[in-house]
Image (tube, rainbow, N blue to C red):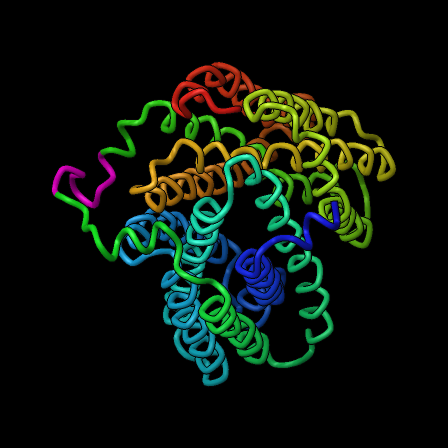
Amino acid sequence: MLREIGRYPAPIWAIFAGWVIGILGRAMIIPFLALFFHNTLKISMATVATIYLLMGVARTVGRLASGFVIDHLGCRRVLYIPPLLRACAFFGLAWCVHVRAPVWVMVALLCATDFLRAFFSSASDTYVADVTPAEDRPHVYGFLRIGLNLGWMIGPAIGAFLARTPFSLLFALTGGCVLLLSPLTFLLCPETRHDARHKIHKHDGALGIFGFRDVWRNKTFTAHCLFSICHFVLTAQLVSTLSVYAINVIGITRVQLGWTYTLNGLLVIVFQIPVNAWLARVSLGRRLVVAAAVYACGYFAIAFVPNWSWLLVTILLISFSEMAAEPAVVTVVSRLAPQALLGRFMGVYGFARETGYSLGQYYGGWLYHGFSAWPAVLWGGAAAFGLVAAAGFAALRKPVLREEGGRHA
């Protein structure tokens, strides 16, 4: 397995490093952003929640817009130009915090950073689909998830270490991290077939406004995105509802909660590649169905957790289901997408992903508010989305196979 990783080409390693660096920079500030607005700037938590909502909308819109831009400019340019602009936005935030600029200016720049972050996400997904054989994509997408988890593990530790420094320094450091993405991808990520095609051929008017008409006409892909939204509604509970429930209902400490998330990240880093290797002979359709169903069972089991030890057991179940499902979801998208519209398909998929996360956090908060005293109802209401996703993925197994022209799905 390690030998196979060593054979990955330089562009894949560059994108892996890009995820580590980019997420590390973001993770340095996100855990402390609410504290900065509420405790330092004396902004109400209701306003802070609205700020997070606006950032979520910016990511969602950015994902959709990125697909159009990728298909017109090519993956390579979108891998290195938006990070430059995003770094500038973070440096601007550092200056705004230093001079205590109006809050609305800071919010606008934060939304700009999340909007531009969506471009790198879509471009990296598209680039992998364009340079990797179809049968290898689950392995490569899983490998990139290791980079994401590495960034999320290291970033908060650095942010906590620098917690007593001015918050402007954290923004400046994040800008420096993001800035590294541009030369990294510029030097190590050559043009792909997708990029070359768009230098020669321009999209014709048959694609409709912004070229998304043909994307929505692919009913299998559209259905896959809708069921993926259900899957990501459940996924969102890990970082929103679970944290509040674990402390207020199960009664664990903040330190134990931190170790819980550390365990989740470590499991992905250590076992993502072995899990991919173990599931290599399992069709993507079956892998998605089983993983989504087990994922739902894992979240429902939280309702019956009496203490931290049993919570860690459920995290094991959830983490391994996540490792099976996440690379498969995006791999199906890469196989359904025609070469000419690869960027748009990835952009629409990203739109679905961010929509699921945003709706999931809102829905989870509503569930907790109304049913925290009835854990089976709370977590059953969340797990229901996972079961809907599993049923949907099961119904799509044969259509996905047909769309791929009989390839292993």
Q: Is residue 204 visible?
A: yes
**Left or right for 398, reference 240:** left
Magenta range: 205-213
Query: What residue is rendered at 71% in x and 45% in y?
Result: 268
Say whether residue 233 is visible: no
Q: Nearer the viewer, residue 332 or 93?
A: 332
Which residue is drawn at the image coordinates 38% and 68% (left, top)? Answer: 81
The reply, left or right, for residue 100 in relation to residue 201 is right
Magenta span: chief secondary structure: helix
Q: How many marks?
A: 0
Position of residue 114 measured from the top left corner of the image (x, y, whole percent): 44, 59
Q: Position of residue 14 (x, y in %)?
A: 56, 62
Quadrant position of residue 247 = top right
Residue 207 on the magenta segment: yes
Q: Residue at x 44, y 67 (%)?
A: 83
Give the answer, above or below, for where 361 lies relative to 377.
below
Compared to 196, does 162 lie above or below? below
**Can you give x and y, in whole percent of width and height, for residue 96 in the image?**
44, 79
Q: Nearer the viewer, residue 271 or 45?
A: 271
| 203 in relation to 47, above or below | above
Residue beneath the point at 44% across and 22% down: 400
Q: Is residue 158 above or below residue 372?
A: below
- Direction right: furthest residue: 309
Choose between 304 and 12: the one closer to the eye.
Answer: 12
For this orientation, the residue located farthest to the left is 205
- Across and down, in percent, residue 10 comes to 57, 61
Near-viewer residue (205 or 135): 135
Image position of 387 (left or right of 311) = left
Q: Is residue 177 magenta?
A: no
Locate the N terminus and report the quarter of the image it occupies.
Answer: top right
Left or right relative to 254: residue 211: left
